[in-house]
Amino acid sequence: MSKIGFTKKDLEDVASLSRLHLKEEEKEKFLIQMKEVLEYVGKVSEIANENVENSGGINYGEQFENSVNKNVVREDIVLNEANSNTEDLLNNAPTREGNFVRVSQVLDKHKK
């Protein structure tokens, strides 16, 4: 079984991204629990599936050849003209910058 590394720093990063403020004793408790969960996931991922057939391969798709739903398509219907609701959207946005809705930064906010 392969060991999955999960450090206190990893836990602090996850807590930060989740906006959780953990006390030191909570960190120790959750670190132990997370390691146990990851070890269990590692065990499950190692289970051999010898009796399971491949889902792909040379003959994949033969079961669909005689399907009544073969090549079913429909005409695309345009419900609204492009950009017809743009101004309404921008007027209802809390913050606007030109023709864009301004939102607070989410990605890389917690990177140092």
Image (tube, rainbow, N blue to C red):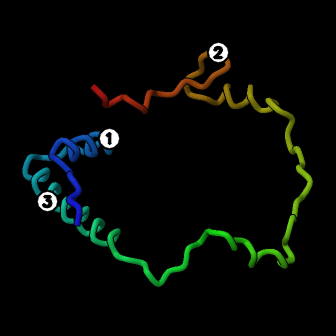
63 or 10: nearer the viewer: 63
9 or 22: nearer the viewer: 9
Secondary structure under the numbered disc 3 in the rendered image: helix
Residue at figure coordinates x 31%, y 29% from the top left = 111
- Residue 9 image point, x, y percent: 18, 41
- Looking at marks 2 and 1 on the same chain, the residue that comes earlier in the sequence is marked by 1
Three-letter code, disc 2 = Gly
- Looking at marks 3 and 2 on the same chain, the residue that comes earlier in the sequence is marked by 3
Secondary structure under the numbered disc 2 in the rendered image: loop
- Residue 29 image point, x, y percent: 12, 58
- Residue 3 image point, x, y percent: 20, 59
Residue 32 is marked as 3
Look at the image and tell me in which quarter the N terminus lies.
Answer: bottom left
19 or 46: nearer the viewer: 46
Q: From mark 2 to mark 1, how far is it between C-alphas?
A: 30 Å
Tell me if mark 3 has few (under 14), some (14-19) or many (20+) residues whose alpha carbon lies within 10 angstroms of its own: some
Q: From mark 3 to mark 2, how far is it between C-alphas?
A: 49 Å
Three-letter code, disc 1 = Leu
What residue is disc 1 on? 17
Do tag 2 and tag 1 residues touch (Cβ < 8 Å)? no
What residue is disc 2 on? 98
Look at the image and tell me in which quarter the C terminus lies.
Answer: top left
Residue at figure coordinates x 92%, y 53% from the top left = 75
Residue 48 is marked as none
Examine the rendered structure and indicate whether residue 25 appears above or below residue 100.
below
Q: Nearer the viewer, mark 2 or mark 1?
A: 1
Residue 50 occupies which quadrant of the picture? Answer: bottom left
Residue 72 occupies which quadrant of the picture? Answer: bottom right
Three-letter code, disc 3 = Ile
- Residue 86 image point, x, y percent: 74, 28
